[in-house]
Amino acid sequence: PNSRGMAPIVLVTGGSGLVGQGIRWQVEENKNTPQDATFVFLSSKDADLRNLESTRACFQKHKPTHVIHLAAMVGGLFKNMKYKVEMMTENMIINQNVLQCAHEVGVDRCVSMTSTCVFPDKIAYPITEDQIHDGAPHSSNEGYAYAKRMAEVLSRMYNAQHNRSYLTVIPTNVFGPYDNYSIEDGHVAPGLMHKCYKAKQTGEALPIWGTGKPLRQFIFSRDLADLVIWACLSYEGKESLMLSPDETDEISIADLAYTIADCMDFPRNKLAFDTSKSDGQYKKTVTNARLRGLRPDYSFTPFKEAMQISTDWFQSNYETCRK
């Protein structure tokens, strides 16, 4: 029980997105509800978090004891480059409103999600949580990155001034059911799934930009959801947490493409690596040492198994998914 002596009521903003749906799966299918917590999932039709009154009315209605804050204005490279003002201002406003309304209704524990893309562009590897403010983010997404960094700062300010227990969690590349499969503006894994689906229809080769050598860390949305529920209801610290599989589990873009192809029954010999295209950063390795200090035995879903669940969901829900 929390300070009000009752079972937790956890308000999840961004409840219909990739991670929110992962939490819903954990709660509804996996019965993952520590302390008999009740979960309330918000989507943008329940409240406009950019509007303080709308946000406040929603918090007054549900009176949560805990908040998992996932809602954000997000986008791929193109959207981040084109809408720098909105990526910064809307995310800052959403974060300010959510933390303010959480505080007003007496929420002691708020876990806000940021992203590894908010770290400095020039940085020593492996990246730790404490390096977040050690330099400028990459210029391509600086509006979003600075807004997300401010969520980390604002959480600490509430802790310092009001003795709250607000913190941020930082996942690596997330994939899973209910992703955004846009080829133009999505992330690498769902974008590849969609390209693979289309190549299967047309019988053409599947073009992949670059050599396939860069390494990335991927986390399955249901594993991430499990860890976020734990961070909210069981972890008692206030320090930011990097949520990522181990450094030894880095996956090359080529391995990612081959795994998706295998899961979708697409022939590997039809993957065409276009080496005239640039690779981007070779690696962006983060360390999960802080998480492992707290959860040394946590076992992540094997990558191939998680990818099979994800590609099966995408193909079954192709008509209605975000793309």
Image: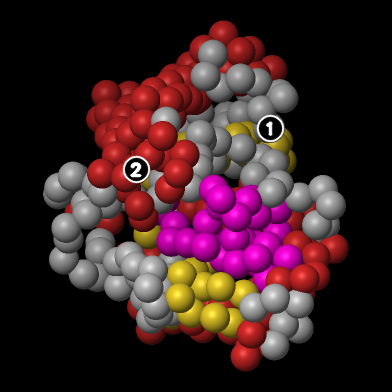
Q: Is residue 155 visible?
A: no
- On the image, the x and y values in percent for residue 51 come to 54, 13
Element at badge 1?
loop
Callout count: 2
Q: Which residue is more in the foreground, 183 or 154? A: 183
Residue at image location 60% in from the left, 35% down from the top: 13
User: Which residue type does callout 1 highlight?
Assistant: Ser
Residue at image location 60% in from the left, 67% down from the top: 192
Quadrant into which the N terminus falls: top right
Q: Which residue is more in the foreground, 185 or 37? A: 185
- On the image, the x and y values in percent for residue 256 come to 54, 77
Find out whether residue 298 is within the magenta segment: no
What label does residue 141 carry, if any?
Answer: 2
Vertical order, 51 against 78 (above or below)? above
Real-space Cα separation, disc 1 to disc 2, in angstroms: 24 Å
Q: Is residue 160 visible?
A: yes
Judged left or right of residue 77, residue 312 is right
Query: How many residues crowd mark 1 within 10 Å: few (<14), some (14–19), many (20+)?
Result: some
Bounds of the magenta segment: 169-198
Find out whether residue 193 is within the magenta segment: yes
Q: Which residue is more in the foreground, 191 or 107? A: 191
User: Which residue type does callout 2 highlight?
Assistant: Asn
Vertical order, 213 against 46 (above or below)? below
Frontmost of labels 1 and 2 is: 2
Mark 1 highlights which residue? 43
Judged left or right of residue 3, residue 137 is left
